[in-house]
C-alpha cells in the first residue's frame, strides 16, 4: 500500500522516510519551514514508543502511514512524528528541527525568542513554534492544517546517532541537512 506525499512513500521503512524528509518543507496552518533534522523509530527498535506494543498513548504510530503521531515528552513538550510503514506495524519519524521559513513573526510570538536559529531547533520547539499539540494527533499529513512540499533542490544528508535515548544508542538513525545552522545539537558520528 503506497502512500506518496512530497515525493516520499510513507509506507517505506522509517529510516528511509527519515532520510528523505530532509529538505522537505512542512507547514501547519501556513507556518513552518524546511526539515533539517529527523530521527527514525521502528517497533523492532528498543528506543521506540512502539517496541512494547500498542497502548492508548502510542496507537497513532501504528498507522495509517502519512499521519501525525503527537506525544508529550517528559510531561512538558509536544513532539511531532510522521507515521510510516503499513498500518499495524508501529514506525515513525520524529521531526527534530526545521529551518523557519514561513510565519516567522507567529513563531517568534509563540516561542518568545527573536533568533531564527532558536525557533525550531529541537522537537519541543518545533511543536511550540508551529502550534502543534495533541489535537494534531492522528491527523493526515496530506490535508489541512498540514502541508508537505517536496524538496526544491538536492540536499546532502548526514546520518548519525540519535539524541536523548538510553536504548539502541548506536543505531545511526538521526539524519540532518549537512551544514545546517538550525539543528537541535551538533551531529555525532557513529562509533568506528
Image (spheres, grey):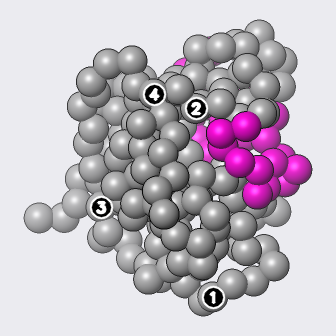
Does the CB distance between marks 2 and 1 fall below 8 Å?
no
Q: Which residue is mark 4?
A: 150
Give the spatial CA distance, label 1 vs label 3. 23 Å
Q: Is residue 162 found left or right of 56 in the rendered image?
A: left
Q: Quadrant of residue 112?
A: top right
Foreground mark, 1 or 3, reads 1
Query: Quick check: 110 above or below 3?
Result: above
Magenta part of the protein: which range? 115-143
Pointer 3 local density, CA inside 10 Å: few below 14, some 14–19, many at least 20: some
The circle on residue 53 is 1
Foreground mark, 2 or 1, reads 2
Pointer 2 local density, CA inside 10 Å: few below 14, some 14–19, many at least 20: many
Q: Residue at x 72, y 21 (%)?
A: 31
Residue 144 picture location, percent across and down: 77, 33
Q: Nearer the viewer, residue 134 or 72?
A: 134
The circle on residue 148 is 2
Does the CB distance between marks 2 and 3 fall below 8 Å?
no
Question: Which residue appears farthest toward the bottom when viewing the image?
Answer: 52
Element assignment for label 1: loop
Amino acid at each position: 500500500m503506497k502512500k506518496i506525499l512530497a515525493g516520499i512513500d510513507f509506507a517505506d521503512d522509517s529510516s528511509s522516510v527519515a532520510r528523505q524528509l530532509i529538505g522537505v518543507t512542512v507547514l501547519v496552518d501556513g507556518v513552518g519551514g524546511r526539515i533539517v533534522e529527523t530521527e527514525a523509530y521502528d517497533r523492532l527498535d528498543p528506543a521506540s514508543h512502539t517496541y512494547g506494543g500498542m497502548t492508548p498513548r502510542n496507537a497513532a504510530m501504528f498507522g495509517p502511514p502519512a499521519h501525525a503521531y503527537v506525544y508529550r515528552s517528559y510531561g512538558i513538550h509536544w513532539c511531532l512524528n510522521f507515521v510510516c510503514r503499513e498500518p499495524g506495524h508501529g514506525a515513525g519519524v520524529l521531526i527534530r528541527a526545521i529551518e523557519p521559513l514561513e510565519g516567522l513573526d507567529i513563531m517568534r510570538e509563540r516561542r518568545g525568542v527573536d533568533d531564527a536559529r532558536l525557533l525550531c531547533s529541537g522537537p519541543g520547539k518545533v511543536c511550540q513554534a508551529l502550534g502543534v499539540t495533541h489535537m494534531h494527533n492522528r491527523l493526515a499529513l496530506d490535508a489541512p492544517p498540514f502541508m508537505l512540499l517536496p524538496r526544491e533542490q538536492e540536499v546532502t544528508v548526514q546520518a548519525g546517532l540519535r539524541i536523548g535515548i538510553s536504548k539502541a544508542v548506536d543505531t545511526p538513525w538521526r539524519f540532518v541537512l549537512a551544514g545546517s545552522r538550525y539543528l537541535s545539537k551538533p551531529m555525532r558520528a557513529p562509533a568506528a
